[in-house]
Image (cartoon, grey):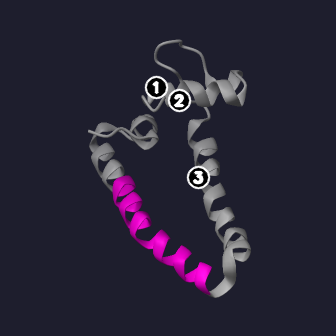
Amino acid sequence: MVRSASSAILPHHFDKNQLNFALSAAMMGLSIGLIIYPMVASYLFIHYGFNQTMMMLSPLMLLHFLGVGCYTQGYEDKNAEVKLEDQPVSQSLKIVLTDAKVC
């Protein structure tokens, strides 16, 4: 099974009855995004060029960082018993990614 950040973050926000649906919705969104994003990017590259396309797509990419910031506040590391909000952002992100077995 492939673990992503969502599989580590979602269990902290949903109970066991809702967790399967939440993980399914997250994976479905990932799949749909992987299908649609290249088509949109290709269309924009052809019609607007590289610079304008990057200016249009960069806010969408920044939404991922907003999502991480929103859902990791108050996240407690099971191993250290230290709240991430008491630590610098770089240390908090490292703890979350390590817990999710990303790095």
Q: In the figure, 95 relative to 60: above or below?
A: above
Magenta residue span: 25-46
N-term mark: 2 or 3: 3
Q: Residue at x 53, y 12 (%)?
A: 80
In the image, residue 32 lies in the stretch drawn in magenta: yes
Determine which residue is flagged by label 2.
96
Is disc 2 surrounded by few (<14), some (14 to 19) or many (20+) residues within 10 Å?
A: many
89 in relation to 25, above or below: above
For label 2, the SS is helix
> What's the mark number on residue 99?
1
Left or right, 70 with respect to 31, comes to right
Task: Find disc 3 in the rendering and name its residue.
Answer: 64
Identify the mark nearer the N-term, 3 or 1.
Answer: 3
Q: In which quadrant of the rendered view does residue 75 lie?
A: top right
Q: Tell me: 9 left or right of 18.
A: right
Amino acid type, label 3 = His
Image x and y of residue 40, in percent:
52, 77
* In the image, residue 54 above or below residue 74: below
Q: Residue furthest top?
A: 80
> Disc 1 to disc 2, how far (Cα)?
5 Å
Image quadrant of residue 90? Answer: top right
Which residue sits furthest bottom?
A: 47
Amino acid carrying label 1: it is: Asp
Looking at the figure, which quarter contains the N terminus? top left
